[in-house]
Image (cartoon, helix red, strand yellow):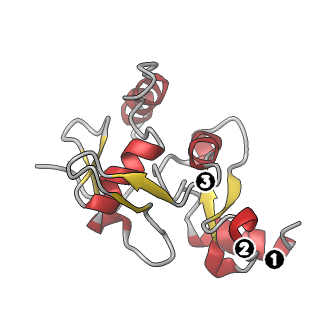
Amino acid sequence: MIDKTIRKLVRERAKYLCEYCHSSEESSAALFEIDHIVPQSLGGSQTAENLALACQRCNGYRYNFTTGIDPETQEEVPLFNPRQQKWSEHFIWAEDGLKIIGISPFGRATCNRLDLNDDEHNERFIIQSRRLWIKGGWHPPDGDPRRV
């Protein structure tokens, strides 16, 4: 069980955004999960430095994976680590704000492993949600880089 104080710190530090797909917790029907960057099953701790805020979708796809395949190079690389890396150095939004584009091996592997754009399952639920969030003026989050 993660301490209540640490949970609060993780949520506030993330500004209530999923640290992987940058969805807003405010637009979700449920509170986001506290994700172990290095899963406990692989020896990860419950310290704030090993925790990230994750929507249910990203948390489910991430499961206990720590690596993914970069589709550009076909190499296995570590997934994006929000404690050690800056989101804007690995991801940008498509011009229309509907898709996240990985701009580094870590970003591309994370987009692929976490299916950040519904590419793998062709469901388009996250794209539909983002479309609604854009109409409401809630997306993409302030400060996120947009593709020009």
Instruction: Determine the secondary structure under disc 2.
Output: loop
User: Nearest the camera: 115 or 94?
Assistant: 115
Alpha carbon separation for disc pair 3 and 1: 17 Å
Residue at image mark 3 = 54
Label 1 crowding class (10 Å Cα cut-off): few <14, some 14-19, many 20+? few
The disc placed on residue 43 is: 2
Label 2 crowding class (10 Å Cα cut-off): few <14, some 14-19, many 20+? few
Alpha carbon separation for disc pair 1 and 2: 22 Å
Instruction: Determine the secondary structure under disc 3.
Output: strand
> Which residue is outermost to the right?
1
Give, as a three-letter code, the residue at label 1: Thr
Alpha carbon separation for disc pair 2 and 3: 19 Å
For the residues labelled 3 and 1, say whether their Cβ atoms are less than 8 Å apart.
no
User: x%, y% of residue 1?
Assistant: 89, 66
Instruction: Determine the secondary structure under disc 1.
Output: helix
| Earlier residue among tags 2 and 3 | 2
Please name the residue shown 72% across and 47% down the image.
Answer: 31
Tag in front: 3 or 1 = 3
Q: Is residue 137 visible?
A: yes
Residue at image mark 1 = 5
Q: Establish if 16 lies above or below 7.
A: above
Tag in front: 2 or 3 = 2
Q: Is residue 1 left or right of residue 62?
A: right
User: Nearest the camera: 135 or 92?
Assistant: 92
